[in-house]
């Protein structure tokens, strides 16, 4: 294992993050505050409690997941797409590194950034609502696994994308709707029975449900199923990336 | 000397059937400078990209320092430094960080003293904390060289390193290349500038249409294929070469006041004495005599056009 190479890629990517630290920090704080104003104050005044939890607190895990998923994808996809776009990918391809090392460097950095933003949102949320975390370790584990798996997905999107429009396509058209429809701001039990069943085909439901369980001890689907779902998703992404590097699809001519 | 790079029957075909490399075989000895000449689309960059791991070969074998580029890719690639043709650099990164990154990517531990030495040698030390986007084109090209040297490669590929670079900087780069050679680095450079190959190469390879047409010692090539021309300037212009001079296969210049005689410098007899005697016997009065040596460019153009015909 070329650990120095992994660390070099990781540090290089994190330098980009630190160059724009202010924006990286400000943007999630601002958007979280807006969500609390709109959902917490405006809608929350009409919905008192969900599953016995104050609505303001109930949406915190969903809000964190929403940002963490989109940030993981955008960080990782941009991280690998940018070298392709400006041509510096030649350096990665001609270096004595294998696919796992490249992935660990890029995905590790993307996941770190998303994790940081997740904690920033959590800290911001505590300014608006009273929050106690029932299973802190499980919360960190779910957050970490979500960051990693979605960063892996972002990495695949970055390799697949041929232009900046395609880079935005999947996050905007697939991920954001799935997150919004995955119970970020409501409980699945609030839906009509037929939609409750259809929703179970949305993989994001399992992630948000598991994450919410770590906060409040209640969930839409069993925690074990959530863990299995996130583990399966991670394995699937890793398999796709392994195939990409084995065949050189869209990276090696 | 042992071959540090050995290429056997290397082929590369793309989807759609285009064959960029048609069975290239090449042996490069440790410590030499090989200049690879060829027209646009000849396969120079594909050859370099394949050896360096950027392009996957369709068939054939490439060994770098005895290591297969596919089976022992780590060992093979760690010996290679690549300066690409395009200026591909992260624009917002500082020069020094960009060079440090390259060293790290090759698994080499931090060595700021070496980075400083490389940057100073390439006149980049003063710009080490500048963002790459702030540099001139020539400086960016030097950053690419610094990045390629950062992991102390034994084989350095320079893909048109002086394209678009002014004459002064080009000569500076030649000095850097000569110094690297003195330190035992093997250098393979592709170039459009024949003068570059003449100035710094030990051997010259000519590639066209995905095939190596020739690889020869530069001096031997010049001597073997190099022809010299004797120009006999006449005091009075003539309409045609006199028949008595026909055996010398002379050409008459456009103004009709100079006879051009092409001869082989390595031939036992150049035929110059007989020619001058016959010119005098034909009643022509000489005003001057000059000679001109064929350049590598003439040889190159001759080979490539001969290949096409």
Image (cartoon, coloured by chain):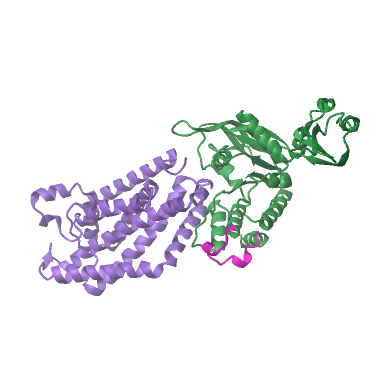
Chain colours: A purple, B green
Up the image or down, A124 lies above or below A206; here it is: below
The range drawn in magenta is: B122-137
**Closer to the camera in the image, A7 or B164:** B164
Residue B52 shown left or right of residue B1 in the figure:
left
Residue A250 lies, in percent from the top left, at 42, 43
* Image quadrant in which you'd find residue A111: bottom left
Was residue B245 drawn as part of the magenta stretch in this picture?
Answer: no
Q: Is residue B28 visible?
A: no
Q: Is residue B226 above or below residue A57?
A: above
Q: Please identify the quarter of the rendering in which residue A241 is found.
A: top left
Q: Residue at horizontal 38%, vertical 61%?
A: A113
Q: Is residue A84 left or right of residue A235?
A: right
- Nearer to me, B302 or B49: B302
Residue B246 lies, in percent from the top left, at 81, 26
Q: Residue furthest left?
A: A192
Q: Position of residue A101 (x, y in %)?
A: 46, 49
- Residue B38 visible in the current orientation: yes
**Residue B261 occupies quadrant:** top right
Residue at 22% across, 52% down = A206
Examine the rendered structure and indicate whether residue A83 appears above or below residue B128.
above
Q: Is residue B61 above or below residue B77?
A: above
Toward the viewer: B208 or A42?
Answer: B208
Q: Left or right of A34: which side holds B229?
A: right
Q: Residue at x 50, y 57 (%)?
A: A8
Q: Is residue B128 magenta?
A: yes
Q: Position of residue B222 (x, y in %)?
A: 76, 37
């Amino acid at each position: 294992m070329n650990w120095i190479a992994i660390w070099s890629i990781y540090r290089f990517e994190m330098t980009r993050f630190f160059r724009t630290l202010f924006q990286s920090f400000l943007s999630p704080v601002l958007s979280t505050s807006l969500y609390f104003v709109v959902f917490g104050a405006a809608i929350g005044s009409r919905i008192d409690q969900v599953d016995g939890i104050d609505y303001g607190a109930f949406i915190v895990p969903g809000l964190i997941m929403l940002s963490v998923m989109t940030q993981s994808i955008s960080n990782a996809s941009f991280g690998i797409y940018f070298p392709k776009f400006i041509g510096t990918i030649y350096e990665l391809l001609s270096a004595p590194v294998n696919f796992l090392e490249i992935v660990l460097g890029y995905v590790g950095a993307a996941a770190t950034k998303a994790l940081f933003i997740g904690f920033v949102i959590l800290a911001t949320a505590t300014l608006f609502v009273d929050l106690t975390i029932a299973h802190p370790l499980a919360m960190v584990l779910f957050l970490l696994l979500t960051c990693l798996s979605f960063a892996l997905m972002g990495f695949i999107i970055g390799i697949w994308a041929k232009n900046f429009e395609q880079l935005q396509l999947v996050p905007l058209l697939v991920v954001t709707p799935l997150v919004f429809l995955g119970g970020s701001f409501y409980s699945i039990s609030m839906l009509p029975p037929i939609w409750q069943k259809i929703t179970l085909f949305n993989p994001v439901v399992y992630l948000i449900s598991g994450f919410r369980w770590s906060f409040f001890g209640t969930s839409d689907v069993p925690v074990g199923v959530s863990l299995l779902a996130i583990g399966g998703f991670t394995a699937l992404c890793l398999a796709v990336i392994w195939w990409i590097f084995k065949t050189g699809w869209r990276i090696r001519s | 000397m042992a071959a540090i790079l050995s290429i056997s029957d290397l082929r590369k075909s793309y989807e759609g059937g285009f064959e960029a490399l048609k069975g290239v075989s090449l042996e490069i000895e440790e410590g030499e400078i090989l200049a690879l000449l060829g027209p646009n689309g000849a396969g120079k960059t594909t050859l370099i990209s394949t050896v360096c791991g950027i392009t996957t070969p369709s068939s054939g074998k490439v060994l770098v320092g005895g290591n297969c580029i596919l089976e022992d890719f780590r060992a093979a690639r760690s010996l290679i430094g690549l300066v690409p043709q395009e200026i591909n650099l992260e624009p917002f990164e500082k020069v020094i960080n960009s060079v440090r990154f390259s060293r790290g990517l090759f698994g080499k531990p931090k060595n700021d003293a070496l980075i400083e030495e490389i940057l100073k040698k390439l006149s980049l030390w003063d710009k080490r904390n500048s963002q790459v986007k702030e540099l001139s084109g020539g400086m960016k090209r030097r950053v690419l060289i610094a990045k390629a040297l950062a992991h102390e490669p034994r084989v350095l590929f320079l893909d048109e390193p002086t394209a678009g670079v002014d004459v002064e900087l080009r000569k500076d780069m030649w000095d850097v290349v000569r110094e690297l050679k003195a330190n035992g680095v093997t250098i393979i450079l592709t170039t459009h500038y024949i003068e570059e190959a003449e100035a710094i190469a030990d051997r010259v390879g000519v590639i066209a249409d995905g095939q190596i047409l020739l690889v020869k010692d530069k001096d031997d090539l010049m001597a073997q294929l190099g022809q010299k021309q004797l120009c006999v300037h006449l005091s009075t212009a003539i309409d045609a070469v006199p028949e008595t001079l026909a055996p010398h296969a002379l050409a008459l210049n456009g103004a009709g006041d100079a006879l051009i005689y092409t001869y082989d410098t390595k031939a036992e007899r150049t035929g110059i004495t007989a020619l001058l005697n016959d010119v005098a016997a034909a009643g022509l009065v000489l005003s001057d005599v000059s000679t001109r040596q064929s350049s590598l460019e003439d040889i190159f153009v001759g080979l490539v056009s001969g290949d096409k015909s």
